[in-house]
Amino acid sequence: MLFNKIIETFLNIKNQHVNNEFEIRFGSFIQSKYFDCNVDISFFYRLKKMLKNQNNNKNHSYQFFVDTYYKQPNNEILRETIRYSNLDKTKILKKEIISKRSIKYHNEFDYDIRFSVASETIVKTSIKKDIITTIREKERDTFYFSCGKIDLTKVYEHNLENNTKKI
């Protein structure tokens, strides 16, 4: 019932952006304000194993990304994404600059879940790369189903603004 209501709300969003993405994120709420999208490592690997077994390891892909976030003169943060075919970063599959805009989100505090819709627009003009705020390396397993896909992503993050690192 709750899930149907949330989906209806998000499906009613009208936007000129074609590339809207709907996400369901698992994590935890810190002081009822900040959402930390980490899950317990044993849960992550149990879910990954279950999805591989359910799919007989078909309809599955693996990708490695490096995202670099740049602060622009107008304070907008733009993301440069480089997608590699393997972990040793020898073959670039795709490289693009993305502007991401949050459209709407809903927090479900009882279940530690965040539902969100965002749009991502490819930036075609050159950008300033003077101020790097964050670098994220992502290892992503994607499992494809007839109704959508599930991404399981390990993220290694280095925040250069406050010199912190986390996985």
Image (cartoon, rainbow, N blue to C red):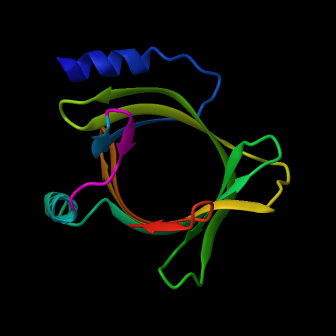
Say which residue appears at 60% left-offset and 80% top-offset: 91
Residue 86 at x, y percent in the picture: 48, 79
Q: Which of 90 and 105 is in front in this view?
A: 105
For the C terminus, give its image quadrant: bottom left
Above or below: residue 77 compared with residue 24: below
Residue 146 at x, y percent in the picture: 29, 42
Residue 36 at x, y percent in the picture: 35, 47
Q: Which of 133 and 91 is in front in this view?
A: 133
Say which residue appears at 69% left-offset and 57% top-offset: 96
Residues rendered magenta in the picture? 32-40
Q: Is residue 127 visible?
A: yes
Using the rendered view, name the quadrant where residue 130 is placed: bottom right
Above or below: residue 23 compared with residue 42: above
Q: Is 116 placed left or right of 84 in the picture?
A: left
Residue 147 at x, y percent in the picture: 30, 38
Q: Is 56 placed left or right of 23 in the picture?
A: left
Above or below: residue 107 compared with residue 29: above
Say which residue appears at 22% left-offset and 64% top-offset: 41
Q: Is the magenta stretch mostly helix, strand or loop?
A: loop
For the N terminus, give its image quadrant: top left
Count up the numbered dots: 0
Instruction: Please tell me whether residue 111 belongs to the stretch shown in magenta.
Output: no
Q: Is residue 68 visible?
A: no
Say which residue appears at 50% left-offset and 17% top-offset: 13
Q: Is 66 placed left or right of 50 in the picture?
A: right
Using the rendered view, name the quadrant where residue 46 is placed: bottom left
